[in-house]
Structure formats: structure tokens, C-alpha cells
Amino acid sequence: MSTAALHLLAVAAVASPLAAFGLLALFTLLVGSPSERNVARVVALTFLSSLACTATLALAMWSGGVVQLDVRLGAWFAAPGGYRFELDLLVDRLTVPFMALTTALLGVVGAFSVSYLHRERGFTRFFLLLLLFASGMLLLTTAGTIDLLFAGWELVGITSALLIGFFQERRQPLRNALRAFATYRLCDVGLLTAAVFLHHHAHTARFVDAFGGAPWPAGETGLGVGVATTIALCCVFAALGKSAQVPLSGWLPRAMEGPTPSSAIFYGALSIHAGAYLLLRISPLLDRSPLASWALVAIGLASAIHGTLVGRVQSDVKSSLAYASMAQVGLILAEIGLGLRMLALAHLVGHACLRTLQLLRAPSALQDHWRLEAAWGGALPPAKGRWPLPERLRSWLYRLALDRGQHDAALERFLVRPALWLLGRLDRLERRVTGEARP
Amino acid sequence: MTPTSEPGATDDPILDALERARHLLPAQGPIDVFIHHNTLHAFQHLPFEQALAEGVRVFGAEPYLSEARYREELARGRITEAELDAELLALEGSRLPDLPPEVDLRALRKATLLHGLEEAEGPALAWLLEEKGLVRRLHARVPEATRRQLVFDTRDWLSGDIGDPAGLARALTGEPDVGRCDAWLLATLDSRTADVAALLWRDPEAIAAAALWAACLRRSAAIPIEPAPPPVRHRDRLLALTGEDSDIVVHGLLIRWCSAYLDQGLAHWPLPGREAGFFAAFRELYRQGLTLEEPCLRGLRAELHDLAARRVTPQAACLEVLDSLGVPAAGREEQVTRALLALPGWGGMFSILERRPPQPGSDARPALIDLLAVRLLIERRALLDLARRHLGPDTRLDALPPAPKEDVTRARERLAFRLRQQCELLGLSARVVNGWTDAQARAVLAEEQRFSSFERRGVWQRAYERHHRGKILDALAARRRRFGPPDRAPPGRLQVVFCIDDRSEGIRRHLEELGPRFETFGGPGFFALPIEFRGIDDARHSTLCPIVLRPEHEVQERPHRGDTGLHARRRARRRALAFLGRGSAIGSRSLLGGILATLGLGLLSLVPLIARTLGPRLWARLSRWIAGSALPMPRTELTALREDDASVGPTGKRLGFSADEAAARVARLLEDTGLAGRTGPLVAIVGHGSSTTNNPHASAYECGACGGRRGSPNARLFARLANDPSVRERLPAHGVELPSGTWFVGALHDTTTDGFEWLDRELLPESHRPLLEELAAAIERARRLNAHERCRRFESAPEGLSPDEALLHVEARAAHLAEPRPEYNHGTNAVCVVGRRALTRGLFLDRRSFLVSYDPTRDPEARLLERILGAVLPVCAGINLEYYFSTVDNERYGCGTKLPHNVVGLLGVMNGFQSDLRTGLPWQTLDIHEPVRLLTVVEASPAAILAVLERHAEVAELVRGRWIQVVSLDPETGAMQWWGPRGFEPHVPRAVEPPSVRTSPEWYAGRTEHLDPAFVLSGLEGSA
């Protein structure tokens, strides 16, 4: 297959959800809510074509021995001073598994949602957001520049928050959506800073240029250790929020407010692994920076232990699965930090598939339990921890785990309250200076 | 601290209050057994409407559908204006003495019903007036004729004063100040001229509306405004004062602890110290050192230390908190009630589990008082933090500042807006309003209050029910008119006893349409056999009977003697599978096991994921086939008859029935259903169950008469007992003669897949095999048609399915991982008929009727009637009322949409991350439900029914409180009497003839809505 055809396939895979989103959104705005059947048709067609493009692309690359595809579509806009927002796609051995995972799981979850959300108010809204999320995820994974990756990253973030708050008429989902959104925005600072540093020091936003052009995972960077460490740490910070790692993990169980399939695709399968993808993509920087690598390993392991411990005491299915995800993603990040990229990739793909199934089957928890009991022939033996710990330490650990590591308490005590206090003081000072009375 | 709070001194006030509050909590237990019951059971001793009002007061729940919804029903003809008029006429109420003569009460009420009122105040009202232009336009919903009358009247009135500016000014603004009047006109009408004549000529409606609004505002100035009573809970008072909700903090903590405490096996690490009770467990775990204290709960740890040191009991702790909140002794009960009702689901679960024996898999000892104590302790800290942050560091909770007073202008405008809408609906202009005395204006508003939204919706609801009642009773009367009274038609050769369940009506009708040789009966699906049952695949016993009964017998399923080896192998393999399954389920969530699971099973999990979503039926078949070949099922038998009188099962109950006990049970069902004396050669006993996937509410779909489980063991047991020679020979002693040629066979009908399974068919004698073949062939046809009829209600089913395709479709639904509506359950229930099948055979009742067989001709003393109504009505009414309440307020009485549900503690579901335990029914079983009180037609004279009411308290409560609509149908004359507000009153059905079709599909084909009754002639052949 010619290179032009491969380029076309890559663009089609990414563009079809975006086009479907645009079409559906325009129709809804101008004409009114389309029928469920039509929405389902559009969604099925979109994910099928996206999946078909991805599969053909993967086969063609594999059979043609192409390991890297650099698609340049020109600049979206240029700014005075020489900045150009390049629309570049990069398809390589890291991208293809992610594209395949994204399109396949979205296809299944899309099919699942068509019947699960039947007759629900917000049916069209859900699929609009799902299409937008698909666009964001594909853009994120195929982006050839860190700028484009950031665009995808933002789409994933905003759709995630909007789907957590899917049930708009209830207060709690909205509060929790806001919480997730705030965490995302905080961590976006990391990615944005990384982009700025990359521009400043490497004079490019292209991964190919910055990492020497060798196909992933072989890339190398010519940047100095200090710069590499800074950029890598910024990216690690960005990944913390998106992949719900300590100490910014508190939003993850709270994100289980939306419809079950959206929880599955975001927090079991794709969105939660976006941080891992980012770190895999910038792995040459991690190679260059032992500090960032070890920081990543430490954070990953801490999250894994935190997730496991807290997950063990959760008495509802979705929280229990959320913490299980957090733990595995922590391990994946640690693997990346240790340089075990292929293992991390395999681990990630397997984890995404398994967790999607488990989350979609979350409503079965009850029937599963009774079925197991029946097969066992009586009450199941308790699955208590096997570590020989003294009773007092056990109950202290339990308390800590039930309070989710007391992250919320710590955040409120050491961050939120002092910040509010300071702002209050500043407010009072300003009023005294300007002579304005309290409202 | 006050002296009353010494521990042990005054335990009782809190416990007393708690006991009274307990009744208000939901009565739904752990969700693996879902029992339908009257959601407002706490108020069942009151008449229905009063209970609804209590529901509004106590739970803040909606009593009826919305007025907009009823108006839609009127528009589509589901309610007619004539029915509305009839209900308005029946509405009692004298005229208020001060009501002005211009107000025509009936016209006003009718107009209010038809056009509705709008509630608005403050910014919402300002928006309506300014942005929607209501200050210069009459409301859009005012009918044209009324609008014209109002405008013309204003014009005539003002035209008389055109030459007198001062007079005009007085008319319009109440003062003869021409300058102010002009300014008002310019501002209000947004015009460039203040010339009234020109305005009247150009846009009379604007000036009419503006004048009316001004007049109403002036009137409302003289009406005293009653301040709203202060809220009971401190949380509400602080919410009003600070805008911050303390419940967010309290519930965040409390729900986590409640679910961890009550968990029956979902968490791998249970809460330590559960056996000491919730209060003690919380106290000990929470007060540990080396933990951070949430800033919003500062002081809680120290307080728990103090409580532990002083050994304070939970009730004493409650008293201490209430005292420190400044709650007087008289207000304690209200406080306790409100505190518990802030999280009713969790409170209800504590309350229910407290009264049950300890659950397997849990060492928790729940007690409601513990929950209350923990809640109050947490809540006080949260309130204190909130109050101190917003109201100053020295704020005391027993001396909170009063809530800010309502703005007077805002209150006046609200009143004026209500007054204005009354005038608009009656076409009364500003002239009339100006002429009223203050007392008259007050009376108009009082009348509006009297005919409140609650009353209006009550009228709508009764009209809604009247319409439905009329249709059904007309059809019953027409059937009698056309096909004669239900005389004793010759018995069918092949008889089938189904459960009374409304879902059985379809398959019964389809079966009977195949010819007069088929006859069906309806009896409660436990078939008079209350048992504790354990099948060979069950972990423990389950109670198979209505919850009001306590079984005295235990029955086990055992492998056939020749198959014990097979059984042992099966058990061993199942155990191994369970070990693997549990291991991988836990492992996939643990740290290192998770790596293995994700790497090993990760990609494999795509297979079930894709298969169960895209090809659910194939997947189900495949897994059945694999299970069948890997785990072959041994032949089994039931421990039906007791071998010797001493044999007792593991539950401490008698293991199996004695021949005499069995004969009594068998006789009872045969007598109740009217089968006795008309049995043919083969009688099938059909229990029912359901099979759904990925559905926490699975039990709600099973047989209610078997306590939320499938009824096949009872059906199988009944056939086994009734076929037994030793039981047979004792039957005459119980008043039933059974021909020796009669044989029984059990079966199971799956209401989701319309599957049909014959039980122990090999035990039937050779002579009866052909009969069974004949019946089985007919059932094959009937179940396909039943699936076909069900598919018309599924919006997601393709149109134009054949019966065979329909069967495949419903099978796929049952196995589909993403199907929230595997079936509609009792979603269409509305009617219950207690009487001979000959009343309803050949009538299309749309799968909406519980059909209870009862033969009044063999029951002169209403002895059978009493036990039938006593057993059946509470169950049917429970189902119907649960559907009613879950529909009218799906958020408070029901459990909302299934989409975000999250199984917690194996007890129930929460919304998403954490919420109250959601009780009641999910929206997905209710979206086609019509909430009407069960129309119960009893084929018995009023005297017989009254006699039953005398003897049976719960039935009397349901009938007299009008929780169900009861109609007596005289067995002799066919005369109908309806139980109205004043007891039985004659009901004269209209002389209308339902349409006639040959078969059911002719009537329902291509239609998706609820259908009226029709004659299905093929069901009537030979029997008429």
C-alpha cells in the first residue's frame, strides 16, 4: 500500500468520530434531537469505519514493514514570531495498539450503550460526548506534536467531566464532576508547561524531531539532563491527574456517577491510561532523567499500594473496581519508570480489556456472589488479608483505608482551608484599602 | 450539660421516639429477595388520600403524576372531560361565605384543571412579568373566549372615564394622581404615549393585563402574610443562614461507615469489631491515634474518647447531642424522625436487619439506635464547624440566629400573581377586582388554596381511574350480555393452573384460543405449599411462599439413587469452579494477582465482552451447552412425603409432608381454584420465574407468591403429592373427590424468555403421555404468541416479528448484558379479577390483570372467599401500590434510573459513587406503567364481601381505605356495585360493545400502547 493511502487511513481513523460528532451536533442544534435509531446508526458506522481503518492500517504497516508513519497535514494556525500549530499525526508501534484498543472498546461500549440508555433522557447527549471523547482519545494517541496531544488531552478531560455530571438534575454528580474537572485542570498545567519547555529548548513540538527520528521505543533526546528532567517531571505531574495517582487520586471513585458504560470506558479502559500513554510517548526523556524515572516508580508503587489497600475495604462494586484500576495503573507507571515499556504496553492493553468487562458487569455483583456461593455449597470463606499484623495495626490500617488514605482530610486541612483563610484575609485587606463594605 | 443527659437515667424517650420513627423507614430488605409491598405501608390504616397527604408531609414526595402529565392524558383521550366533570361534581366542599358572586366555583375549578396554574415568585416571577411580558399580556393558557371577555370588560370600564383623567388614574392606580398614573403607564406598557384612549384602541389586552396586575397587587397589600414555620433540623436552618449544606459532610462519612458495617461480603476486608455494634465499632475505630481529623469534624475524636471513658450508651449519647442542640423534650421525636429520614434507605436497612437473625457472611449486629447516635454525633460536629465558620467563633447551636425574614414585596407579589391567575381563568377584569372587599379577595385566595395542586391532581387521578374502570366493567358486562352468564361450561380435557400473576394472562389467553379443550385456572404461585426449599445446586434454604406465611415444612431436592456418583462429581467440579472464579475475581483486584490476571485474562475478556453484547443469545446457548456437558445434571427427586414423623430437616422443620398434610394442601388448591369436581385427565401446574442478566433487581421479576423466587419447586412438589396414591386416598376426607384417571404434571414458565420446562414428565404413566404431548405442542404455540404479544411493548424490538422470531428476541433480551428491560415485569398491572374464568375467557385483557380463580357457586358461606381474598389481595395490592408510588415519585419512592446504580454490600444499590440506599422500583420497569389503584372485581355479592371485611382486618383496611378499587359482581344477576366514598354503590355499565376479533394478534398487531378489552372469538368457542 502506498504511503499516501496509509496516511489517508490514519487521518480517516481519527477524523471519522470528529466528523460524526460535528454532524450529529449540527443536526441536533438545527433540526432537533435525532431518533435513537439514527444516533445508533451513526455511532455504529463511525466506530466500525474507525476500527476498519485502524485494522487495515495496522496490517498494512506490519506487512509493509513500516514502523513509523509521519503524517503532516500543515498548520492549523501560525502566530507571529514563528510559532505554528502543526497538524501532524504520528503512527508507530506505540500508537497502533492504542488506536486498536480505543476503536475496539469504544465500538463495544457504544453497542452496549445503545441498549443500556434506551429511552433515557440525554441519549443523544451521551453519544455526542462519547464521539467527542473518541475523537479526543484518537487525537491524543496519534498526535505527532505535543500541541496536538494537548488538544486531545483536553477533549478527553472535558468529556470525562461532562459524563460524570450526566445526571444534571442531581447535585452530587455535578459536585463530583467539578472535583474531577478541577484535578484535571490543575494537572493540565504540567502538560502545558512541558509543551512550552519543549518548544523553548528543542525548538519543536514534533516528537519525531525532539527524539531524533528513531521509531518508538528507540528514540533518543539531545536535550540536557536538567531540561529533560524538568519536562519529564511536568509530564509525570500531568499524568498524575489523568491516571488518578497519589496524591491526586481522590476524584477517581467519585467519577463513578455517570451511566455504567461511561464509567467503564473512561475509568476502566481509556481515559485512565492516557497518562501512561503520555509517559510512554516521552520515554526518551525518562531515559535521559533518572530522577524523573525514579519519581515515577515511587509514585506508581505508592499508588499501587494505596489502591490495593483502599480497594480491599470498599463495600461497593464500582469503588472497589476504581481502586483496583488505580493500583494496576500505578504498576504500569512503575514499569514505565523502570524502562519496561513493552511490558507496560501489554499490561495496559490487558488491563483495559479486563476492567471494561468487569465494570460493565458491575450490576451482576449480587448474582455473581450468590452463584459462587451456590457452587461452593455454602457461605464463602472470608478473604481476609494473610499478613500477620498485630490487631491494633490492622485496625489502624483499616481506618486509614476506609478513609481512603485520608487524602480528603489532608487536602482540606493543609490546602483548601489555608487557601480559603488566606483569600479571606486578602479580601478583607482589599476592602479596607478600597473602603468598600462587606456585601 | 443538663442533668437529663446522665447515662442510664432517661433511656426511654429516645427509644420511644425511635420506635415510632422506625415505621416511616422503607421496609425493603436486602435486594436478593425483593418483595413488592405498599410503599406507604406506614399509613395503610388511613384512607388512601390522607396517606398521600402524609407522604407529602413526611417524605416530601409527590402524591400523584404531574398536572401536565394528566393534561396530556386528557389530550390523547385517556381521560375525557365528562369523567373530569363527574369527579368535580363528586368533590365535596361548600362555598366559602365571602366568595364574591362573580366567582363561579365549578367553572373556576374546571378552568384551573384544564389550564393549570403557575407558581412563581422572586426572580422567577420577575422574569415571567418582564421577559415573558406577562405584565402586559394575559397568560398564554387563558382560553380565547375568556381572554376576550376580560379585555372587553376592561375597555368598557375605562371608556366611561376617558374624559376624566383623575377618575382614570384612580381606576388604574387606586389614586387620582394623573402624573403618577401616566408615569406608570409609560413604564409598564413600554409605550411612548400615556393616552389611555389611544392605548385602548391600539392594544386593549396590554392595558387590561396591566390594570389587572396593578389591581391584584393593591388587593394583596391587605392580605396578611403568614410566615413559614421554622425548619425542624439545624441543618435546614444553617442552610438558610449560610447557604452551605452540612449533610454533604455528614453523609459522605456516614454512608461509607454504614455500608462497610452492613456489608455482607462484598469487601474483602470486613470492618473489624462489628459484633460489638455499629456505635461501638465506629467509636473504637474512629478515635484511634495517628490519624488526621477532618477539619469540618474537629472535636469528634476527643468526644468519642470521652464517651468511651464514661461508657455512655448510644441512647444517652443521642440525648446529650439533642440537649446540646437545644431541642426541648417535646421536640425530640420530630428531630429523631427527621434525622433518620435524611437517609431513609440506610436507616431502613439497619431497622430491618436488626429484626432478622444474623446474616450468613456477616457478624454485624445492626441496631437503629446505633445509627442514630453515630449520625447525631457526626452531625453536631459538622453543624458546629459550619456555624462557627460563617456566624462567628462563639456561635452556639442551641442559640442560632433566626432565619432571615421573607421579603414582604416578594410575598405580596406571589399572592398577587396567584390572585391574578384566578381572575384570568374566570375572565374577571380589574374593575371587578377593584370592587371586592378585602375579605372577598382573601376568600378568592383561600379558595385557590383549598383547590390546591394536591386536590386538583386527586381529581385528575380519580378521573383517570374512572376511565379505566369504565372500560373494564363495560367489557365484563358486554361479555355477559353477549355470551350469557358464566354457567358451568363443560370442563376442558387439558387443564392448566397458572400463577395469578398478571403476566400469565397472555399465555393463558393464547392457550385457550387454541380450542375449548384447553382450560386454565389461576391460583397463587406457591400452590398452597409453603415450604423451605433447598435444591441440589443451592447454597442454603429459601422460603417459597408469600412473606406473610411461615412454612412448617422443609423440602429438599436430592439426586436420584442411581445418579449419586454423577452428583458427587458435579458438586466437586462446581466447587472447583467456584474456587477458581473467586480466586480470579479477588486476584484481579489485588496487587500482584492483578498483573497475572490482566496479562493472562486481559485480552481473553474481549471474547465475552463482545459476545455478550453483540450476540447474547448465542453466548447464552454456548454457555448452557458447555455447562451441560461439563456439569451433567443428575436426575433428582424431592423429599416430598415424610418417611416417619420424627424426621426433621436442617432448618428444624418437618422434612416433607405427611400424607394427611399433603392431602389437605392439595384439596385446598383444588377447592380454591374451583378445579375440584371438574378435573380432566391431565392437569398441569405451572409455576413461574424469570431469567435476567446484569440486573441487581432480578428477584423483583420472580414469583411474588414464592417470596421473590421461582415457583418451579412448588409446582413440581404439588404434582408429586397430588399423584401419590396415599395422598389420593385421603382426599375425600378433605372434601375433594378426584377421579383416579386424573394426573398432575409440574412445569415452569419463564416470564422473560417465555421458556417452558416440564418437570418430572417421566413420572407420568404411559397412558397420559399422548395427552402431555398434545398439551406441550399447544404450549409451544402459546408461548411463541405470548412472546409475540410482549414484543409489541418493547420499543427496541424490530417491527413485524413473526412469533418464532419474537421468541428468539425475548431470549436475547434475557441474556443481553446491556438490557435494562429484559421484560416489563408487572409494569402494566391494573386489574384483578377474582371469579370464574368464564367471566373473562375470550376477553383480551392486555396482560394487565391478575386472574384469581374462584367459584362462588360452591361457596355459599363465603368461606373460600375469605381465605382467597386474605391471601391474594394483600399481595396484588402490594405489587400494584409499589408500582403506583414508584411511578408517581420515582426519585423518592422509587430508585430512579438504573444507569448509575452501584451494588453495595450485597444489600442494594446506590446512585453512583455514594448515596442513600435506593429502595423501590427502577424507572426502566415503570416507563409504560399507568398508575391506577388496582381495580379488583370480585364475583361475589356485596354481602359476601362485607362479611369478609368483618373477619379480615388487612383486607378491610385496603378496601375501606380505598387503596384498591373494589367492585362486586353478583354471581347470579351480574349486577355491579362499586366501593365508593360511602361504601358499595350501584355501578351501571354503559351499553357498549367491545370490538370482536378472531385471535389476539388481530387486535394488538402493529400497536404499541395499552389496549382496551376486545372479544377474542376463538377463545370463546365451545365455552359460550
Image: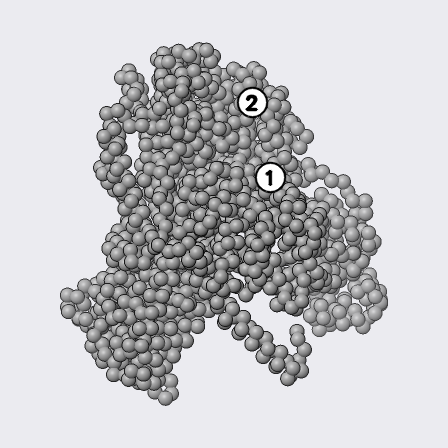
**Mark before the other along the chain sequence, 2 or 1:** 1
Check disc 2: other Cα within 10 Å, few if <14, some if 14-19, many if 20+: many
What colouring does the structure picture have?
one colour
Residue depicted at x 36% and y 64%: A303
- Position of residue B529 in the picture relative to residue B177 (left or right): left
Quadrant of the image for the N terminus of chain B?
bottom right
* Residue B42 numbered mark, or none: 1
User: Which residue corresponds to mark 2?
Assistant: B866
Does B554 appear above or below A352? above
Q: Quadrant of residue B753?
A: top left
Of the residues shown, which amino acid type is indicated by label 1? Ala
Q: Position of residue B897 (x, y in %)?
A: 47, 50
Between marks 2 and 1 in the image, the one whose residue lies nearer the viewer: 1
Q: Position of residue A158 (x, y in %)?
A: 42, 67
* Residue B579 numbered mark, or none: none
Nearer the observer, B968 or B710: B710
Q: Quadrant of residue B866?
A: top right
Q: CA distance from mark 2 to mark 1?
A: 24 Å
Nearer the observer, B330 or A321: B330
Nearer the observer, B750 or B640: B640
Disc 1 element: helix
Does A421 appear above or below B577? below
Disc 2 element: helix
- Position of residue B198 in the picture relative to residue A180 (left or right): right
Residue depicted at x 82% and y 61%: B160
Q: Quadrant of residue B420?
A: bottom right
Looking at the rendered structure, whether the residues under marks 2 and 1 are on a common chain is answered as yes
Q: Given the image, what chain letter belongs to the residue carrying mark 1? A: B
Does A122 appear above or below A230? above
Of the residues shown, which amino acid type is indicated by label 2? Glu
- Position of residue B479 in the picture relative to residue B192 (left or right): left
Residue depicted at x 27% and y 36%: B571
